[in-house]
Amino acid sequence: MIFEGLSEKLQNALGKLKGKGKLTEKDVNDAMREVKLALLEADVNFKVVKDFISKVKDRCIGQEVMESLTPAQHVIKIVNEELTSLMGSVQSKISFASKPPTVIMLVGLQGAGKTTTCGKLASYLKKQGKKPLLVACDIYRPAAIKQLHVVGSKLGIPVFDMGDKQDPVYIANSGLEEASKKGNDVVIIDTAGRLHIDEDLMDELKNVKSKIKPHEILLVIDAMTGQDAVNVAESFNNALGIDGVILTKLDGDTRGGAALSVRAVTNKPIKFVGMGEKLEELEPFHPDRMASRILGMGDVLSLIEKAQEAIDIKKAKEMEEKLKSQHFTFEDFLEQLEQVKKLGPLNELIGMIPGLSNAKELKDVDFDDKELVKIQAIIQSMTKKERQNPSILNASRKRRIANGSGTKVQDVNRLLKQFEQTRKMMKQFADIEKSMKKGGKFK
Ligand code: GDP
């Protein structure tokens, strides 16, 4: 779950205010001390924390909150608003050129995820109807050019390269010519990285910038490196000037420092976040949704968007009909599981549902997707006939399935029982719906 430690501590600190009829200044100060510690522990920049706390306190100690009937709710609302504003308030989108191609230059240190992100961004824009071209200008890191080709071919996106013996400025410029010839409306340039910031690197990037005049320079930084990432962003912004940040590896064990400080320190917005190694795991960054997620208030909008992208609506309708008519088989069930898996790790999904991320009943439930994998293995070990007609599953068939899927007969039985219950329940729903449609009362 995103920023787990920070999230839990903030919710604890603010949770203590709940149930209090009136808040005193001391209550607010105590809560804010805890919020401050939580932010500092999450590696948020010291100055950013100080400003944040002082703003929140000023607003909380105002009349409106102290005299409100639900003061805790008020405080949470203020923290939510200030967290949102800290991260830039509104979503910052890519600005496309009025006359294509739009040129986007990705810069960053080695290992931050630049090459992978070039592919992710190209894929994201392709889904929006753009025709991107990737240009390989990282001529120093061994295998960077090949890596970009691998990424491009996975996505069906063309990659332009001139090997590693030409000057990056020349390659970038030739890439633009190629795009004009082939009708690509977006050019994404993968530039050279280094292990550390050095003058040579900055000079090269400045030369590329002044020659090709990109519409967007996006800096790729690794969220796992916390404050270091923020320092890198400051240096790149001072030396080169950037238009925004792509924060990678937010799926990892990141504490939140980079996400919460980078905007305030550099005054440049986070435009996208990388949520995994896979090429589809890039999300536009919404400050308000991120703040809600951190405070355990869920992010239903992102969840809906994910579902719309991943789920085939026509198939979902068919599935619903099958469920209602009891023609639902284990084969359909398997297909459903595949759809759910496309939405991403269960853990992450749970965090997007308001109230669920910290629900006590769910604290001990293991959402690490193992259960899904197990169910999938069991169904895959069934024959086609068995999947369509589970009633033929006798003891010896069950034993065979358990052996084949590396599970126990009890696991197979449990799945069968759940499956039957679901079928029955859906049948009942369908009957109720039918009788309601007829206008009759259901008994
Ligand atoms: P570059 O040197 O900046 O071009 O970095 P690469 O694109 O080669 O990425 C470095 C490593 O980070 C690779 O192993 C990537 O798979 C990984 N990576 C990139 N983005 C993400 C992300 O959002 N999440 C995770 N978990 N890994 C990522």
Image (cartoon, rainbow, N blue to C red):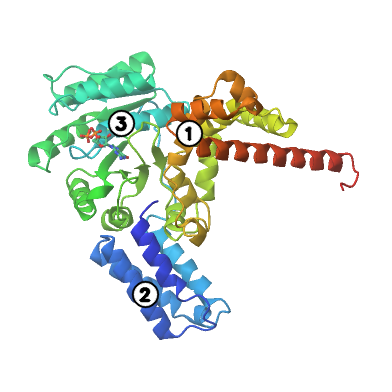
Choose the circle earlier in sequence order: 1 or 3.
3
Tag nearer the camera, 2 or 1: 1
- Quarter-of-image position of residue 271: top left
The residue nearer to you, when weighing 243 against 15, is 15
Left or right, 134 with respect to 75, comes to left
How far apart are labels 2 and 3 at the CA level? 40 Å
Amino acid type of the residue tagged 2 in the rendering: Met
Label 3 secondary element: helix
User: Ligand 1 shows up in which quadrant of the image?
Assistant: top left
Residue occupied by mark 2 = 32
Amino acid type of the residue tagged 1 in the rendering: Lys
- Is 334 located above or below residue 245 in the figure? above
Choose the circle earlier in sequence order: 2 or 3.
2
Query: Tag 1: Cα neighbours inside 10 Å, few (<14), some, or many (≥20)?
Result: some
The residue nearer to you, when weighing 161 against 319, is 319
Q: Are marks 2 and 3 in contact (CB under 8 Å)?
A: no
Residue occupied by mark 3 = 118
Query: Tag 3: Cα neighbours inside 10 Å, few (<14), some, or many (≥20)?
Result: many
Q: Position of residue 66 (x, y in %)?
A: 50, 82
- Is 431 located above or below residue 238 in the figure? above
Q: Is mark 2 within 8 Å of ligand 1?
A: no
Q: Position of residue 274 (x, y in %)?
A: 34, 41
